[in-house]
Image (cartoon, coloured by chain):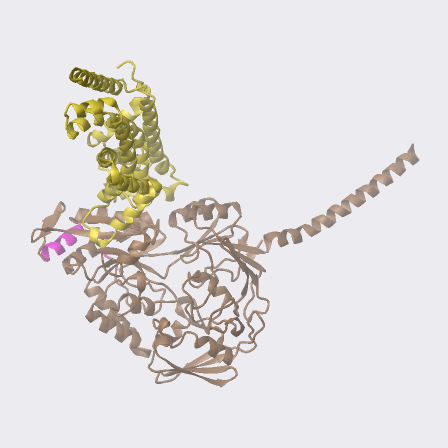
Chain colours: A yellow, B brown
Amino acid sequence: MKSWPWAILTPALIFVLIGIFAPLLMTHDPTKQDYSAILSPSSWSHWLGTDYLGRDMYSRIIGGARTSLVAMVVVLLAALIIGVVIGSFAGYIGGRTELVLISIIDIALALPSLIIALALIGVFSGEAWSWMSDYWKMIIALTLAWWANYARMSRAVVVAELQQPYIEAARVMGASHMWIFTRHILPHVLGLVVVYASADAGALVLAIATLSFLGLGVAPPTPEWGQMLVDGMSYIEDNPALVIIPGLALTAVVVSFNLLGEAFALQKVPKAVRGGLLRRKKSARAGEETARAATEAKA
Amino acid sequence: MKTNGGAAMIKLQRRSFLAGTAGLTLFSALPRIVLADGHDTLKVAIAGETGDLDLLQNVSTLSSYTVVFDGLIHYGAGGALEPGLATAWTVAEDGLSISFDLREGVLFSDGTPFDADAAEVNLKRWMGVPDFGWIGISAAFDSIVKDAPNKITVKLTRPVAAALLELTIVRPVRFLSPKAIGADGTQTAPIGTGPWIVESHDSTKTVLVRNDAYWGEKPSFSRMELLVVPDELARANGLRAGDLDVIGGDWVAPLSPRRASALKGDGMTVIAEPGTATTILGYSPKSPMMQDKAVRDAIFIGVDRAAMAAVLFEGYADATVNIFPTTVPTAGARIPVPTRDLAAAQAALTAGGWTGDASGFTKDGAPLLIDFLVSDEAFPGSRRIAEMIQGQLTEVGFQVNISSVDTATIHDRRPKFEYDLTFFATYGAPYDPHGSLGASFVTAADTGPDGKIYVSDDLDKVVLAALDAGGDAREPAMQAVYDWISSNTAACPLVVSQRIWAVNPRVAGFGLPTTDYDLPFKGITLS
C-alpha cells in the first residue's frame, strides 16, 4: 500500500466518499426554498451561503457530488460492458461480422461523444419518451455516446491476444471458446479498459455538467454542478460564489480523475492491478507451457 | 546681452505663438474629429442580427423596422391612435370601409413620393393575401379605392373591430418605396419614410443615418449603430465601458432585473416602467390531468406570485391574475391578486376527489403528477421560475417533473399540447388584446410554434364574438372573455414584467419607446 500515490488517489477517493455518504453530510434539504434567506453570504447556518431561491449551497454541492457520481458510475459501467462485449465479439469472431461491427464503432468514434449525446437527447425529448426522466435520458444518451472507445480498445486487445501461441495451445487442448475468452483474453481486455475508464471518469463528470449546463441533463430540483453553474451565471457580478463554488468542485474532480488515470496508465498506482495482470500472465504462460509439453509428448 | 536676450525672447514668443496657435486649432477641431469618430452616434445593443428588413418575411428583428418604415397610424401611449402617414381616418358606420387622408409632401428616402398609388401598391402586397390571414383587416379585405392623389379607402367584406389597431403593428403594414419592389413583387431594399435610413448591415451591426427629409421630428444626432451583442453580460459590460449607449427592451436586447440592479449600482441610468406583456402559466387543454378543474384551481391558488415578483424579478414585475395589464386597451376589470393559500389549494383538490396531503395526492390510484415543459433557451429565465413553482406546488402535494428542452422541441411540443404546464407570454402592445386573444385562445388560429394558451369550443364563441364587437359593444364583449377565462380557471397569469432599459451617462433625455417593438431615439441628446 505504501507504493500507492495517495496524493493523487485521495481527491478522487474523497469525491467518491462524499457521493456515497451525501445524505449524512448534508446540513439542509438541498431542494428546500427559503425566500427569507436568498443570496445569503456564508454563515454558521449556511456554510457556503444560499442561492437565488434561498437553498443551502453546501448541501447542494454535496448533493451534486452524489448526482454526478451515480451518473458517472452507471454510464461508465454500462459503456464499459457494452463496449467490451461488442468489441471483444467483433475481434474474436472476425470476418464480415467484425467488418460490420468495426464500421459501426468507427462511425460512432468519428463524431465527438458530446455531439452524439446531444443528438440522442434531442431524439429522447419527444412525447414518445416523456415517460422517462431527464436524468435517465441523459444516462442512456451518454452511454450510447461513450461505448465505442471501449469497443475499439477491446477489439484491438482481443485480436492481438488471439495471435498468441498459448491461445492456439488452449484450442489444441480442446478448450471451448467461452473458456478461452473468459480465462485468457478477458483479463487482458479488462486490464486495459479499466485503466482507460479511470481517466475517462473526469471527462464524463464534465460531460454530465455540460449537458446540465445546456439545460439537457439533470432536471430540477435535483442539485447538479453544471446546472448550478448556469443558474449562477445571472448572478456572477454580485454573487460570484454561485459560480465559483460549483466551478471549483467540478475542476477538482475532473483534475483528480485525470491525474488518477494518468497514474494508472503509467503503472505507478496499480500495483494490485499490475499484480493481477502478472498473475494472469503467469497462469496463461503456465497453460501455454503445459499445452506445448502435451503437443511435444504427442509428437 | 539685453539685445540678444530680447531677440531670443522674441524668437521664443514667436515659436510659442506658432505652437500655441497650432495647439488651439487642433483643440478647436477636436470636438469635430471626436464627433465624426462616433460622438454623434447612438450605439444601441441588439440581441440578434437585424436582417434585410423585408416587410413580408418573418425573419428580421422586429424593432429595427420601426425606425425605417412608417405605418398609416402610430401606436401612442396607452394604445392611443396617433397620425402616421395618414393624418386622419374615418370608419364608415357599417364598418365596411375605412378612408385615410394621406400625409402630403412625404418622400421615401430614395426620393419617391408617398401618395395614394404608393399606398395602394403597398397595401395590396399583404391585404387579402392568405399568408396574412391572421390580420383581421387582411382576411376581410375587399378592395382599395383611390379617392384622390392623397386619399384612399379600404373596403372590407365584414367589419373588423380592431382594424385601426392592426395598422399599428410592425409588419407587414408599413410602407416601402414602390421603387424597392422588384418585378416579382419581392423587396429589393429597405427604403421607407421613417426617421432613419439603413446605410449598411451585416451580421455584427446595422448602421442607420438620419433621414434629413423625414416628415416628423428629426433625431438630434446623425447616426445610430445597432450593434449585435447576443450575450446579456457582454451588453452590460459594453454599457459600462461606453461601447454601448443603450441596452434593454424585450424585443431589442433583453435586460434582466438582476443585471439592471447591478448596472444601477455602477452609475448607469436604469429606466423601468410597467410592461404590456403578461407571463402566463398555461394548462394544456388536451391533458387529462389539466382537464380536472380542481387541479387547475389548486395550481392557481398554490403559486406565490408576490414572491415570484419580489425574488426572481427583484421588484421589476407586478403580480397579476389578469390576462392583460392596464397598459393595453380594453384589458378588463382588475381582479385582486390572491395571497398564496396552501390550505385552499389542498381543499380544492380534496373537493375534486383527490385524497392525500402535502406528501402527495392521488385519485383512483393515480398520483398527482404533472409534466412542466420548459425551455430556458426559448424563454430566458423560465427554468428558474419553473423551479420556484415546482417548490411551491410540491408543498401543496403535487409531483412536478420539469422537462427542460431546447427551442426546437418546445416549438414542436407546444402546438401539440404535449405538456401539462408550460409558460406563455402575451404579445404586448401594440398587438394586444386582439392579437393574443385571436391567436392564443381560438382553436382555429394558426399560431405555429407558439401554441395556444387555452382553447375550447365554448371559449371560441366568446372570443370570436369579442373580436367582432365594435364600438360600445367591444368592452363588455372583451370582459365576457376575461370572465370566462377566470371562472373556468383556463389560464394562470403570473406576473407582468416591467420594461427595463439602461443607458450610460452620456445619453440625456432618454424616454422609453412607446412599445418594446420600437427602438429608442426620440428626445435623446448625446453629450
Q: Give the range drawn in magenta.
A: B338-351
Image quadrant where residue A89 sits: top left
State which quarter of the image contains the N terminus of chain B: top right
The image shows residue A142, relative to residue B159, as above or below, that is: above
Image quadrant where residue A85 sits: top left
Q: Is residue B96 visible?
A: yes
Q: Between B320 and B206, which is closer to the camera in this rendering?
A: B206
Residue at the limit of the structure toward the left, as seen here: B364
Q: Is residue A55 visible?
A: no
Residue A23 at x, y percent in the picture: 20, 32
The image shows residue B112, relative to residue B425, as above or below, that is: below
In the image: residue B2, left or right of residue B456: right
Residue B322 at x, y percent in the picture: 28, 62
The image shows residue A150, relative to residue B393, as above or below, that is: above
- Give the overall secondary structure of the magenta segment: helix
Q: Is residue B381 magenta?
A: no
Image quadrant where residue B200 sits: bottom right
Q: Between B398 and A16, which is closer to the camera in this rendering?
A: A16
In the image: residue B36, left or right of residue A19: right
Q: Between B100 and A35, which is closer to the camera in this rendering?
A: B100
Residue B415 at x, y percent in the picture: 27, 61
Q: Is residue B346 magenta?
A: yes
Residue at the limit of the structure toward the top, as seen here: A2
Residue A29 at x, y percent in the picture: 22, 37
